[in-house]
Amino acid sequence: MHNHKMIQLDILTPVELMRNRKRSCKTHTNKSLELFCKEHNQAICADCASTSHQKCANVSSIANVAEEKKRMLKSAEKTIREGIEKCEESSQRLKSEGAEIAEVKKQTVEEIDGAFHAVSDALNQRKKKLMKDISTHFSKDIPQFNDLAKRMEKIKGAMKANTEFIAELVNNASDLDLIENADRIRHQTDIMLQQNAEVAETPKPKMLVKMDDLSVKNFVELVSLLGAEVGSTQVKGILVKKMTTKMSGDKAIPDIRDIVVMDSGALLAVDNKNSCVKGIIFKGDQFSVQRLALKSQPWGGAKLQDNMIAVTGLKVFYIISLTEELTLHNTVHTRKDYWGICALSPINLACSCKYPPCVDIVDITGRRLRTIEQDQFGNQLFEMPGYLGNLGGRIVVSDRSKKALICVDQLGEVVFTYTGEDDKALQFPRGLCIDRYNRIFLADHDKGCVYLISPEGNYLCTVISALKPRTICLGSNTLYVSMEGKGITFFNIIEIKTT
């Protein structure tokens, strides 16, 4: 066959086809394509190069261009092979990490399962012991009281029979029969009355166990610490004791509006309804309570120095010390009726005022230095400001009407406003205190909680629940909580940081 090349079918491949394919110029018949114009990215013949591509500067032989492309493809092939190696490495790494994650998941599930099995086993063992103790205790008492009840029925029957016999003697017997039986029946009556008194006075057995609701909730709170989110901080308050603040001389149920803890560990409780400040001094497990009567009903308290506090009253604040006893050092008169108070320095105070709603900065003589009531746009900052705290020189204010915790600097610039979200939304914010990390403990009376808020104004955790807190104060590791008419409750603070 003319102008044809014969190739065996069994070796015919795409590469072989391309290698043996002859291409000719479409413009100049039977002219071989031996050149390549890079400007037009086109294979051309010699006639094309001298005519239509005469002005093209970048024309090379197809062999040279093919050599360049080979080098480019070899480089691409090398890059691809390196990419394949990297893919293989990444694939192996991902498989390894996937297996590691699966193993970590398995271990975590086993740890969680083991932890809750341990808690469950401990609870079951505790329950068995309590049930056994109760069963042993009452197995002795119940039969005893059943026997006593039967004995009481017999005594009652005998006394009833005696009553009927006495009636018969008095109404129908002869005088001689009456005389002969009277002393005997009287003697029997005395014996039966004595037996009745002995049975009736049998002491009731003491209960061995009391499942206090708050203790149960404390335990549930501790269980919630299991499996806390990595990197989170959980702070919980565990009830340790309750203390009454009622003392002789009180004319009303104590209404503790504020608590101040001194460096010595003593507590100063501001009792509004009894118009006094009470000092609670601890000595080991014992404590003593002192009273300092004031001329007006006090509201808030703030520590000025180690043993000195300021207490707000009706258009006054009192400067009081506690050493061996409570002493009133000075009564400072003010133009406004202040509620909450906190110390910004040993000589400057921040005080909240209900009418008009504002926060004043005053000095220790009562001189007003600044009033904070509006933001930079002229909007009212507060509606009913109450308790205050010093957050690193800034002032945090609980506003029960706005249902918010508002933080401002001493020039009145708003730093943040915290209202909470969803089930943590504030309902009736009241007392607050600040720890050494500038975190804010905030009491919400209506929600029955004490929340922990970050220095930036973000929710961290719920410290205490299931109570109606009014005011709170923080000691070294104890949170003191006042509930209306219920004295002061002590909570140990437990903090767990997960890493």
Image: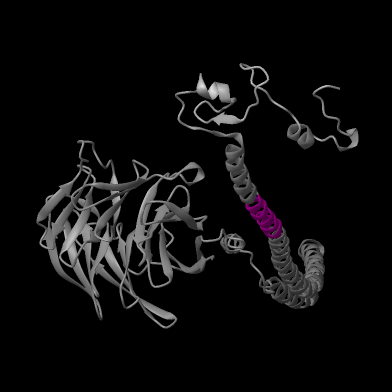
Can you tell which quarter of the image residue 269 is in? Answer: bottom left
Q: Is residue 91 magenta?
A: yes
Query: Going by the picture, which residue comes out furthest to the bottom?
Result: 284
Residue 334 at x, y = what percent? 12, 54
Range covered by the magenta-colored residues: 81-98
Quarter of the figure that contains the N terminus: top right
In the foreground, 86 or 315: 86
In the foreground, 392 or 165: 392
Q: Classify residue 50 as left or right of residue 481.
A: right
Report whether residue 468 is seen: no
Residue 364 at x, y = what percent? 13, 63
Quarter of the figure that contains the C terminus: bottom right
Q: Is residue 369 magenta?
A: no
Tell me the chief SS of the magenta region: helix
Q: Classify residue 26 as left or right of residue 334.
A: right
Q: Is residue 211 above or below residue 384?
A: below
Q: Is residue 109 above or below residue 1?
A: below
Which residue appears at 31% of the width and 76% of the height?
Answer: 263
Residue 64 at x, y = what percent? 58, 39
Can you tell which quarter of the image residue 348 is in? Answer: bottom left
Can you tell which quarter of the image residue 419 is in? Answer: top left
In the foreground, 379 or 281: 379
